[in-house]
Image (cartoon, grey):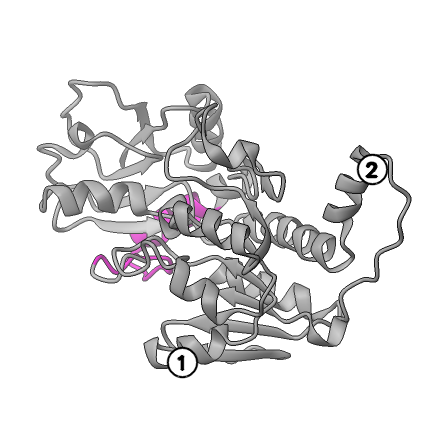
Amino acid sequence: MKILFYTPHSDASAWLHDLAQALPRADLREWKPGDTAPADYAIVWRPPRELFARRAGLRAVFNLGAGVDAILALEHAQPGTLPREAALVRLEDTGMAAQMAEYVTYAVLRYMRRFDEYERLQAERRWHVLEPHPRRTFTVGVLGLGVLGTHVAKTLTSFGLPVRGYSRSEKNIGGVATYAGAGQLDAFLDGVKVLVNLLPSTPDTHGVLNRRTFAKLARGAYLVNVARGEHLVEEDLLDALKDGRIAAATLDVFRKEPLSADHPFWNEPRITITPHSSAETLREESVQQVAQKIEALERGEAISGIVDLARGY
């Protein structure tokens, strides 16, 4: 079998070495511009459109991440970019769920115990004890209950916090009050103290973190966005911070990355910024998962993680 590999950022040689160990029978090559030779599979992260051009016979495209929005953007802009017979496959966890749970738990507990306010008091050299937020009313709402969102919601319940989860279709998660479908979104948002966004990036979810959404939350709520920058209407967040609707926000993703030096978020002390680092793709775990799925396809077996192109996840 012939396999293409492409990533614009990582060291391709390390990936190719590990993939060769996991798939010793495979003919592996790094894609370069002008390469239109046949391939059975492609393993990619943020590939250019040219990689798919005239790629007849491609059986599956494995995306090195949970979010496939970059590939879908190519397809939406020019339908037919993805070969019709090729399945688009996303990574499932590969160590990202534990990292994401760590990140979100830190952000939630930081706000509940008011450590963000202590940081500002320290900068002012002020000794002042703050009462923590009452645990029983510090409701956390997790938008998006995929693999990552479900793990995050379950982790938060272990701290005795009231946790809600929202998804497009119905889910049943022990200890989590779940809501599903557009008709239940307002009920999910009502009174939430910390809103955690883990939604997939689709045309339907772009701009979902907006003025209307913030107005449904408990006054002085907190926002944690670890999904995609396109979900957030940035001007609405700044306005909500000014009028007290939102008390603070932790943002790991942005519409344009890296965040420009003159972006107003840098000057807002109530916004905590991290450089899209909440959950990194782990090479060893990713290689094992992709290799197992390729071998399953070679045996004619079904695999999980295939993206529904219409839904976007």
Q: CA distance from mark 2 to mark 1?
A: 42 Å
Q: Considering depth in this image, is 47 or 263 the residue closer to the camera?
A: 263
Q: Considering depth in this image, is 51 or 14 the residue closer to the camera?
A: 51
- Which residue shows up at 34% across the image and 33% down it? 26
Q: Considering depth in this image, is 200 or 243 the residue closer to the camera?
A: 243
- Image height of 18 relative to 100, above or below: above
What type is the residue that disc 2 sits on?
Gln
Q: Position of residue 156 (x, y in %)?
A: 67, 65
> Which quadrant of the figure has residue 119?
top right
- Image height of 181 relative to 42, above or below: below
Q: Nearer the viewer, mark 2 or mark 1?
A: 2
Can residue 211 be found in the magenta stretch?
no
Magenta-colored span: 289-309
Q: Position of residue 9 (x, y in %)?
A: 42, 24
Q: Is residue 246 visible?
A: yes
Residue holding disc 1: 184
What type is the residue that disc 1 sits on?
Gln
Disc 2 on helix, strand or loop?
A: helix
Q: Determine whether, in the image, residue 202 is placed left or right of residue 134.
A: left
Q: Determine whether, in the image, residue 117 is placed left or right of residue 99.
A: right
Question: Pointers 2 and 1 in contact (CB under 8 A)?
Answer: no
Can residue 307 be found in the magenta stretch?
yes
- Which residue shows up at 61% across the image and 62% down it? 220
